[in-house]
Amino acid sequence: MARKNRRRGQKPPRPPRLRNSGAQRVMNILEEPVRRSRKISLTPMIDVVFLLLIFFMLINTVGNTQVLRFATPAGERKSVEKDFTLSPVFIRSDNTIQIDGRSVAADALAAEMLKLKSRATEVTLLIVVEPGAKNQALIHVIEAARSSGLKNVAMKKLKDAQAILPSGSGGGGE
Amino acid sequence: MIDFGPERPRREYEWRMPLISVVFLMLAFFLITGKMQAAGPVGVDLPEGSLDETKPAEAVTVYVGADNFVYLFDQVVEAQFAPYMLRSYFMKEGHRSVQIKADKNADAETLIDLMDQMREIKIEEIIILTEHAK
């Protein structure tokens, strides 16, 4: 047939075009210009930002921690000398703070300690803690001592302090 | 009176922009102000305080729970056995500064014992952590 057509000067017929064949589809894709979407979806970005926000909110500690620093007479087992002007402050089992046998509120402690400080040139504050007294009360006393400018502060448990307490200072518990 | 003309029609995504701006601002705020801190071995309710002194660069943290147990990294002991744990650790590591994170409901006696023990093992500085009073 093809020979016959060539002899007659006619072109051979084209093979049928396979429009839906795989190769054709690949060719179509390659030939098409790259389409860029004009709108960028913000939703995934918002999701990520929200996740980051929640992460940082949960993981971060709000900066409300404070510090109280103490220098210790490291290594020296220094007992409180009896010649010092000892001013005992008692923290009772029920967390009341007593100075000179009087209960003192936490906010009035600093003023009371200033009075103690004015009694002598070298005052050593002795914080005596009864069993059952809590840390919060101890911190109140330490802070009051610090803010009133008392430099020598000793802390003792009641049973350890009884030997050095001046008589009639209230060490027996009231 | 100034005539501004008809309001321009808003595009679909425009209502979201202020929200994204606020969220970004919040994110920046938390990134800047926040401080990363490793979670401690025990939840501690710090006592309230009013004084704040300069923080040390680095210090080992010892925790005292409300139950008076003493925590140092993954070790937990009763307060009376704390000296052995502290001695073995601090003598080996040679730290000179320790911070105590004690619960406000922990016994004051436990804290005093702990500070006495630290003095004995030549700790030169003790830092007690408190929380800003509300």
Image: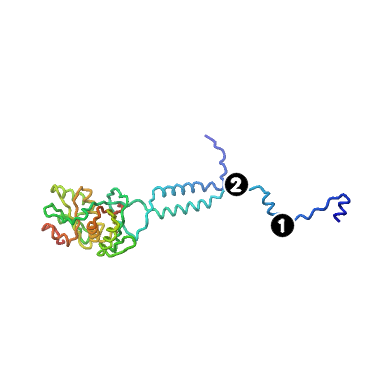
Camera-nearest residue between B62 and B128: B62
Q: Is residue B84 above or below residue B33?
A: below
The C terminus of chain A lies in quadrant:
bottom left
- At x 19%, y 49%, the residue is A151
Same chain, labels 1 and 2: yes
Residue A21: which numbered mark, if any?
1
Q: CA distance from mark 1 to mark 2?
A: 31 Å
**Amino acid beneath label 1:** Ser
The local secondary structure at tag 1 comes to loop
Residue where numbered disc 2 is placed: A38
Residue A36 rendering spot, x and y as whole percentages: 61, 47
Closest to the observer, A104 or A58: A58
Instruction: Tell me the element at label 2.
Output: loop
Q: Are marks 1 and 2 in contact (CB under 8 Å)?
A: no
Q: Residue A19: percent from the left, percent from the top?
A: 73, 55
Q: Name the residue type under label 2.
A: Arg
Q: Nearer the viewer, mark 1 or mark 2?
A: 1
Q: Is residue B93 visible?
A: yes
Tell me the subunit letter for badge 1.
Answer: A
Tell me the chain of label 2.
A
Residue at position x 70%, y 57% from top?
A22
Image coordinates of residue B91 in percent, x first then y, are 27, 58
Q: Is residue A103 in view from this perspective?
A: no
